[in-house]
């Protein structure tokens, strides 16, 4: 039984109220939001139209009251179906003033003459507007100051509601079912690009709305990296095939991978896979409320990188997992430097990597949610033995 | 016969040399590039990993010599397969210094102490790095100035090479074949969300590598907008079904739509579709080297919006088409204010819209390339009669 699409308005009112409480603490008179996940988090505005770079989209979250959308008229109909009442539009693209005048007026309506407007300025963020438009906006705002947002939206998004967890769970289940069908599409002599195409088809057939992310590789004894698109090289017996997917269901992602051996694995591959599962299990065991992200890192790193020669298990990935939700990867990163304290409702990936001979690597990934008593797997945890096709 | 994947190194050397010639004119000592299409344009670095917001990626294009990649180590293996020789990496994410120190050092190596570094700052651009990182970078650069890039990369990307046009043509052909199969998947009582899933499957089966964009709608007498994702409403006889896809083949997009009537169309829908085709044909006839983008706009707008009450044919889209290539939508916009002079090698969409009763709209879209003698259709131009399922 799939969870219902969308959220009740109460979810967005609650997110807004919690943001406003943090804004009061931080001395911010408004938040200015410009990116897809930020707008969607507070409004529910879900569209693939962000693929087009043409138009800027703005949301103003004032210190009190509901958020105000300042958006191109092409989005008015869809935004009108969200809980927002105050939707201000301009006909974009406008080469003279592409919404900046309207945005400045809206901010001036909400923010005192010497007030402070927070924008995301930290890691993993960017401002989705032209730099020249930012400069012009600053000029129009007079003594009002654009400053950092004190990580308010990032902090809120870190802990998922039950409704969000239900959507992520649904996306993960779809991914699990697609991975269970890989033997239908992967066999020697099939081009990797065809396997990629077919795997995306499986994700759709199993209920994915769309498939924003698929990476992977196939090579003997491990693979060179985990971010490559497919080429037309045919699979061969002895290859390790890895597929790493981020499919979307109702706006929420799964993000996990599976490794397959075409024919019996070599000892090195079998041992590497077993180590990856052992590391994942160690990370899982450490993941409970009150533990820190760095504890998960060390629990996994001890297994995959016992010499601790460098962080990241030799895989150059730089981390052993991350947050998950409206985006394929979210804050935080599972690294030694991250001291975030785990709370119930956080959703994470555990993603250890190991180095093999010849510069090859293998990576394994599972999705988990933190509950009051400890972690719970969202994805179906894998056996130590690599799946054989 | 599909064109070969990727480009020869000569293509990237040529792009780099042309950028450097424009940099000399503009008095820029380097370009700093931060977004997916910018990096890919000069390097060929193709990965879906940009879906993750975690890591910044940088490319420095000096006044002379080859570009320098300053990237997370997770991308070193894939970047190492491009033509670039100088690839500098750090292990990201790094909470203390996420590449900014290395980037500042690289820029300091290339740029005189009072030199000028260009970044895209115009419409349709953004800087893909945290605002706090930009401030820190500016601090580390001393008297070196970060300034606008004089639209250099945008100007270069406006005119496509023959190899680029071959890739776009291939993507469009795949889209044409998928649209020819819509009768297989769309019939009364099938949920629109299922039609969307199945249409993406058709795009993959016909040779798309992935499907970054699909929007559309199904409703009687036209639809409310052109950017919505699908809901679970079942199709019904009398609906106008519109599907607008941007699929990728080897890194290049198509972007066009098709309208279908479930059962015989109403007179209003039939007339609207005929007007859309007539407008497209008028735009096509006007599209020849030496004409301006605004000429195309007026040629189409006269047909779909004869009262000229407002721009955009009443569809609130704000424009009647746009550039196409590495991105779903590229510069320029087909609006009255755009005076870009058409040149051989430009690839455009013609996308007129009409208003119907009850706030409904219909939109039609074709993809064209400008050749020496005039425009040539990439997509198969449609008849005045709407396709009936």
Image: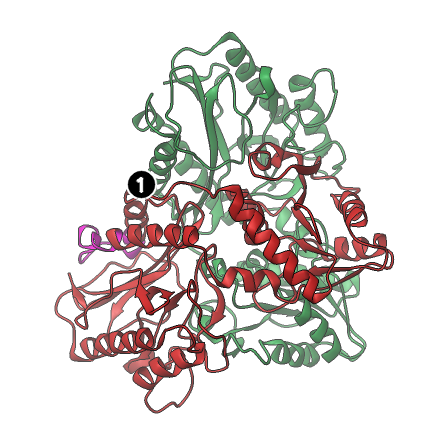
Chain colours: A green, B red
Judged left or right of residue A198, residue A321 is right
Identify whether B367 is placed above or below B40.
below
Q: Position of residue A2 (x, y in %)?
A: 38, 45
The image quadrant of residue A170 is: top left
Q: Residue sitting at 68 percent across and 19 percent down?
A: A305
Q: Nearer the viewer, residue A38 or B173?
A: B173
- Magenta stretch in the rendered image: B178-195
The image quadrant of residue A275 is: top right
Q: Position of residue A304 (x, y in %)?
A: 64, 19
Q: Residue sitting at 50 percent across and 60 percent down?
A: A50
Q: Nearer the viewer, residue B273 or B367?
A: B367
Query: Does the stretch in magenta take in B326?
Result: no
Q: Nearer the viewer, residue A359 or B63?
A: B63
Quickly name the residue at label 1.
A205
Please indicate, yes or no, whether residue A325 appears anywhere in the rendered image. no
Judged left or right of residue A239, residue A315 is right
Judged left or right of residue B267, residue B4 is right
Q: Nearer the viewer, residue A59 or B39?
A: B39
Name of the residue lying farthest toward the left: B264
Q: Position of residue A366 (x, y in %)?
A: 53, 30
């Amino acid at each position: 039984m799939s969870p219902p699409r969308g959220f009740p308005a109460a979810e967005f009112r609650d997110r807004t109220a919690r943001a406003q409480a943090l804004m009061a603490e931080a001395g911010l008179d408004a938040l200015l939001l410009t990116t897809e996940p930020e707008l969607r988090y507070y409004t529910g505005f879900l569209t693939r139209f962000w693929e087009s770079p043409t138009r800027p989209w703005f949301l103003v979250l004032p210190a009190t009251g509901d958020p105000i959308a300042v958006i191109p008229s092409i989005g008015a109909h869809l935004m009108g179906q969200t809980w927002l009442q105050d939707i201000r539009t301009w006909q974009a693209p406008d080469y003279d003033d592409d919404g900046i005048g309207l945005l400045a007026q809206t901010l001036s309506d909400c923010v005192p003459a010497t007030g402070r407007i927070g924008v995301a300025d930290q890691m993993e963020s960017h401002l989705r507007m032209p730099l020249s438009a930012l400069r012009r906006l600053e000029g129009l705002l007079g003594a009002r100051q654009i400053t950092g947002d004190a990580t308010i939206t990032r902090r809120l998004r870190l802990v998922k509601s039950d409704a969000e967890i239900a959507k992520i769970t649904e996306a993960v289940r779809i991914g699990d079912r697609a991975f269970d069908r890989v033997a239908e599409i992967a066999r020697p002599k099939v081009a990797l690009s065809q396997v990629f195409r077919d795997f995306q088809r499986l994700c759709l057939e199993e209920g994915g709305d769309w498939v924003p992310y698929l990476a992977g590789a196939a090579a003997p004894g491990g693979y060179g990296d985990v971010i490559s698109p497919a080429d037309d090289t045919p699979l061969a017996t002895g290859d390790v095939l890895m597929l790493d997917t981020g499919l979307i269901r109702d706006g929420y992602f799964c993000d996990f991978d599976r490794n397959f051996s075409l024919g019996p694995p070599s000892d090195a591959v079998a041992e590497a896979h077993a180590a990856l599962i052992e590391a994942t299990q160690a990370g899982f065991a450490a993941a409970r409320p009150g533990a820190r992200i760095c504890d998960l890192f060390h629990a996994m790193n001890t297994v995959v990188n016992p010499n601790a020669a460098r962080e990241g298990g030799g895989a150059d990935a730089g981390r052993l997992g991350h947050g998950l939700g409206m985006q394929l990867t979210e804050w935080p990163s599972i690294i030694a430097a991250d001291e975030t304290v785990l709370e119930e409702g956080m959703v994470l990936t555990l993603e250890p990597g190991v180095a093999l001979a010849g510069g090859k690597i293998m990576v394994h990934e599972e999705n988990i949610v933190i509950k009051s008593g400890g972690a719970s797997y969202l994805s179906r945890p894998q056996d130590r033995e690599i799946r054989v096709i």
